[in-house]
Image (spheres, rainbow, N blue to C red):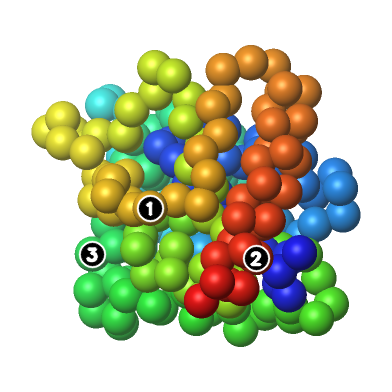
Amino acid sequence: MTDALLVGLAGFARSGKDSAAQALVEGGWRRDAFADRLKDFLIRQNPLVPAYPDTPPYRLVNLIAAYGWEGAKEKFPEVRRLLHTTGSDAGRVTLGEDVWVNALFNDYEPEREALVVSDVRFPNEARAIQSRGGVVIWIDRPGVGPAKDQHGLPYVSEIGLRNWNFDATLINDGALEDLRDRLVGVTALADRYHTAACVIE
């Protein structure tokens, strides 16, 4: 095993990253996400979100309370757009590309916990995990491509890792139980590969 029990999960929206992370959580790992700090930031800002053509906009906190983040993103496209633009255009461009990386790893205690990061989207995020002895796994769900904006263009955060050399790829084409079993196997295999590579270096 590597010194760090650290796994990052990457993949398009709806590929199964959260389900895969939950499989490790059930095995005693702690789940975290770069976007968790972004969501906290947006909740504090509490912007108005256009919901329906003939009704006034709603406050973000009310939508999250009613539908949760995943439900709100699915039902109201503006919520997903806010996450992408605030996280990428505002956060990364204005405060530096490591703004969300630093916020997450400030809470990481490698000697005391196993951590799975469920939303690796950019090269600096993948590097941050691998440089700490972790592995980054791509979750591939057949038929699922990158989420797109209102103009039909993929969000930057959906294609930021299109040329990345992942430690392993996991195909999510079965039941949740299959995903769990495959993740455990792929994680162990990637970890052994990473350990061997470190020894060779």
Residue type, mark 2 in image: Thr
Can you see residue 187? yes
Q: Earlier in the sequence, mark 3 or mark 2?
A: 3
Tag 2 residue: 195
The structure residue drawn at horizontal position 25% and vertical position 34%, both measured from the top left corner, is 148
Residue type, mark 1 in image: Asn
- The residue tagged with tag 2: helix, strand or loop? helix
The structure residue drawn at horizontal position 77% and vertical position 47%, both measured from the top left corner, is 24
Tag 3 residue: 89
Residue type, mark 3 in image: Asp
The structure residue drawn at horizontal position 43% and vertical position 36%, both measured from the top left corner, is 13
Q: Is residue 183 above or below residue 188?
A: above
Circle on res. 165: 1
Q: Earlier in the sequence, mark 2 or mark 1?
A: 1
Q: In front here: 128 or 83? A: 128
Q: In front here: 176 or 197? A: 197
Given contact means CB atoms under 8 Å apart, are the residues at marks 3 and 1 in contact?
no
